[in-house]
Each structure stands twice: as C-alpha cells, then as structure tokens.
C-alpha cells in the first residue's frame, strides 16, 4: 500500500478556494444576466407605456408637436413622421438607445429609450462583484489557514504521540472524546493499535526474560556438574551419578531450546506438510506409546475413524503433549481417554482439573500450574502454547473445556472426513 502524502492543509485550502471561486464566478454571471434581463424588461415596459400614450393622444386629436413635447423626457425621445415627410421632434444623435416604431394612422411614431445609463450601471455592478469576489477569496484564504489548522489539530496530536512512542515514551494515548466521527474512529483505531503493539512488546519482553530464566537453571546445572566431574578423581564412585545428572540437565536444556525453536517457527509462519492423517490411528499410536512408557497406566482411545488433511508429525506432537500433561496431572493411578469424533478429538482425565480462571492462561508461554506442572517433571511450560499454535496453523483451535471432574482438552480441526471402513469378504 502506497499512501499519497500530499499536504492535507494545502489540499483543503486549495479545494475550498477553488469551490469558492467557481461559486463566485457562477454568482457574477447569474447576477449579470439577471440584471441585464430585468433592465431589458424595464426598457420594454417604458417604451410600451410611452407608445400606448402616444397612440391614445394622437387618436384623441392631439397635435403631434404636443404629443412629442409631453412624452419626450430625459431617457425617452419621441419623433413623429407626418404623411408629408415632416418629422416632429429630434432623434438622439449619440449614446446607446433602444428603438421602437409604431404606425398610427398615417403617422409614423418612433420611440428611443436611452440604455447607456443601464449599461454603465451593469458595468459598475460587474466590477463591484469581481472586486467583492476577489476580496472574499482573499479573506477566506486567510481564515482557512486558521480554521484548517484547528480542524487538523488532532492529526498533529497523533503525529506527536507517534513520535513520542518512537522515542521510547510508552503509555501515551489519544483517548478521543467521540468515536462516531472520522477523526474519532481514526484515533480509536490508533489507540487500539498502540495497545496491541505495546501488549505484544510487553509479552515478548516477558517471554524473553522468562526463557532466559528457564534456560539459566539447566545451563547452571550443566556447568556445575561438568566442573565437578572434571575435578573428581577418575576412580570416584560419584562419577556415574554426576554423568547421569549432566545428561539429564543437558536434555532438559535441549528440550527447552527445541520448544523455543518450534514457537519461533510457528510465529514465522512455518509451512507444515499436508497429508491425510487418520486421527483414530494417531490416537491408538499414542496409546501404544504411553503403555510402553507406563505399562500400568489406564489410557484408551475410542471414537470413529476420521481423516484430516494436515501435518501428521505435528498433530502427533500435540496429542503426545496433551496425554503427557494429563498423565502428569493424574499420577500413576490416573485415567486418560482420547475420543475422536467428526470435529476432531478430545483428551480427558480424572485429575484435579484446571480452575476456571486458568483455562485460558495455561496456553500462555512459560506458564505452569502448581498442581499439574512442575519443573521436576521436565516440562518447559511451552507445550500447550506450541500445541495451540500447531492446531491454529491447521485452521482449528485448542481449548480447555469445563468439566465436573478432571480436565478436558478439545481439539477442533476443519474438514474432518469419516474414513470408510474396508469391506469384509
């Protein structure tokens, strides 16, 4: 997206002045034509009235000289041409006049209306309108500078706030008084963006700090055991125990690094493999793996055979994480059930469950619940965050549902299709 960064003040000022100029031009033309039309009507009215009076006077037997003397005025001149060719009255010899002729009997009556005064008045009116229009444009231009500056003050506030945040001053907000206007909606969206960005920044900083803290424990353990192992005599009976501790701490650090790498890949939009995955077969494989690790543990898979298009290895990782969490929460005497249906699958247990206030927080990174997760179990606190990230990368979701006993984790996946069972011969 390439935003045109023209000057908004200049654009508004030029647009307003252009509209005002066009309106004034239209007004001058309209007034000029209206004045000219009305003046023409007035002149025609005077000539028609004078003509009517001249006709009446001549028909009443008045002498042509008397008619000319009575009707001739400063703006109107009357001449009467007699049948013998004699002209009574004087026609104007200069100026602008409108001429009208009427035959009355054998006499020819000619009327002249002086229009020069009207033309001069029209010219003065045009000049006055132009001068007033230019003055109005100039005054409006000066007022626009002040008005537009006040009108665009919220944009300056946004700019100042953005620069302050870029300089490291966090926490500032616009807090618009109204959100039902253009600037109000923009300011509200701006504040929402800042909330999201600063929240993400805080979560990132907290995550980095927590990850560093988590890594420091196994690395410190590796360093301490390695130093002790180097200093221990070759025939020391504690060397085997120290070697075991070294391997355990190294695996713990390696597991945490692997989980951090998996999260980084998910955040970067890691492209997963797409293949048809049998969810019931995946659940049965997880049951077999768990029974191999803990032969006496009560775990079973049930449901209908369904298939989904996704990354089988990642989905198996999600299922293994949920089962391991459930097994750690319930203990050796616990019960875990994996149920596959047409929406995905669920993993339920009979453990202490998850408090309602923690059902969403457990999916945050580096979060452990005291009753269900402990550093001694080797968990990094990233498993559920990775599991939800994997499922959402498949277009689904992972949630912790309310339960009267134990915990229920539901995985919803899109486009789950039943698997046709093979026909029996």
Image: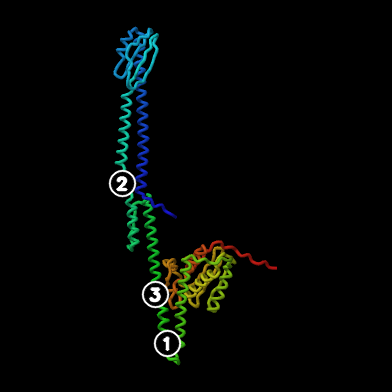
Task: Identify whether 173 is placed above or below 250.
Answer: above
How many numbered discs sit on the rendered protein? Answer: 3
If the image is split into quadrants, where does the N terminus sit? bottom left
Q: Earlier in the sequence, mark 3 or mark 1?
A: 3
Query: Residue at the location (36% across, 54% down)?
Result: 187
Residues at marks 3 and 2, CA–CA distance in whole angstroms: 57 Å
Q: Quadrant of the C terminus?
A: bottom right
The residue that appears at 39% across and 8% down in the rendered structure is 106
Q: Is residue 355 visible?
A: no
Residue 145: assigned label = 2
Mark closest to the chain's N terminus, 3 or 2: 2
Residue 201 appears in the rendering: yes
Q: Quadrant of residue 101?
A: top left
Question: Viewer-proximal residue, 210 or 123?
Answer: 123
Is residue 219 rendered to the left or right of residue 410? Answer: left
Q: Nearer the viewer, mark 3 or mark 1?
A: 1
Q: In the image, what residue occupies the spot 32% across and 35% down? A: 130
Q: Position of residue 48 (x, y in %)?
A: 36, 17
What residue is drawn where x is 46% and y is 81%? 248
Relative to 408, residue 223 above or below = below
Q: Which secondary structure, mark 3?
A: helix
Circle 3 Cα neighbour tier, 10 Å, few/some/many (<14 / 14–19 / ≥20): few
Label 2: element kind: helix
Of 8 and 97, nearer the camera is: 97
Along the viewing direction, whichever of 67 and 243 lies nearer the viewer: 67
Name of the residue lying farthest toward the bottom: 235
Label 2 or label 1, whichever lies nearer to me, is 2
| Viewer-proximal residue among 311 and 149 | 149
Marks 2 and 1 sit apart, C-alpha to C-alpha, by 79 Å
Dot 2 or dot 1, earlier in sequence: 2
**Which disc is residue 230 wearing?**
1
The residue that disc 3 covers is: 213
């Amino acid at each position: 997206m390439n935003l045109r960064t023209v000057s908004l003040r200049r654009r508004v000022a030029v647009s307003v002045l252009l509209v005002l100029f066009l309106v004034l031009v239209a007004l001058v033309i309209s007034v000029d034509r209206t004045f000219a039309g009305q003046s023409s009507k007035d002149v025609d009215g005077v000539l028609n009235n004078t003509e009517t009076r001249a006709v009446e006077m001549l028909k009443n037997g008045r002498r042509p000289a008397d008619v000319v003397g009575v009707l001739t005025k400063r703006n109107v001149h009357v001449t009467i041409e007699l049948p013998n060719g004699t002209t009574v009255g004087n026609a104007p010899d200069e100026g602008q006049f409108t001429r009208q002729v009427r035959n009355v009997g054998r006499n020819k009556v000619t009327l002249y209306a002086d229009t020069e005064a009207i033309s001069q008045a029209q010219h003065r009116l045009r000049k006055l309108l132009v001068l007033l229009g230019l003055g109005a444009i100039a005054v409006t231009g000066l007022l626009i500078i002040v008005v537009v500056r006040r009108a665009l003050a919220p944009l300056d506030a946004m700019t100042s706030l953005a620069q302050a945040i870029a300089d490291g001053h966090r926490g500032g907000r616009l807090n618009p008084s109204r959100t039902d206007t253009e600037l109000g909606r923009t300011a509200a969206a701006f504040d929402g963006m800042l909330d999201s960005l600063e929240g993400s920044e805080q979560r990132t900083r907290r995550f980095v700090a927590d990850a560093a803290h988590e890594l420091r424990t196994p690395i410190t353990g590796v360093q301490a055991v390695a130093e002790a192992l180097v200093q221990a005599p070759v025939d020391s009976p504690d060397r085997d125990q120290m070697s075991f501790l070294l391997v355990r701490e190294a695996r713990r650090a390696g597991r945490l690094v692997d989980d951090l790498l998996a999260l980084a890949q998910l955040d970067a939009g890691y492209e997963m493999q797409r293949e048809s995955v049998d969810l019931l077969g995946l659940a049965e494989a997880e049951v077999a793996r768990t029974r191999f690790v803990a032969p006496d543990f009560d775990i079973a898979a049930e449901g209908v055979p369904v298939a989904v298009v996704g990354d089988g290895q990642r989905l198996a990782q999600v299922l293994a994480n949920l089962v391991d969490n459930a097994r750690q929460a319930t203990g050796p005497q616990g019960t875990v059930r994996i149920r596959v249906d047409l929406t995905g699958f669920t993993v339920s247990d009979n453990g202490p469950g998850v408090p309602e206030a923690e059902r969403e927080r457990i999916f945050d990174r580096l979060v452990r619940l005291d009753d269900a997760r402990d550093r001694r179990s080797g968990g990094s606190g990233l498993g559920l965050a990775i599991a939800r990230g994997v499922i959402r990368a498949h277009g689904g979701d992972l949630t912790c549902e309310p339960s009267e006993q134990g915990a229920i984790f539901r995985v919803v996946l899109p486009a789950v299709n039943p698997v046709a069972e093979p026909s029996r011969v």
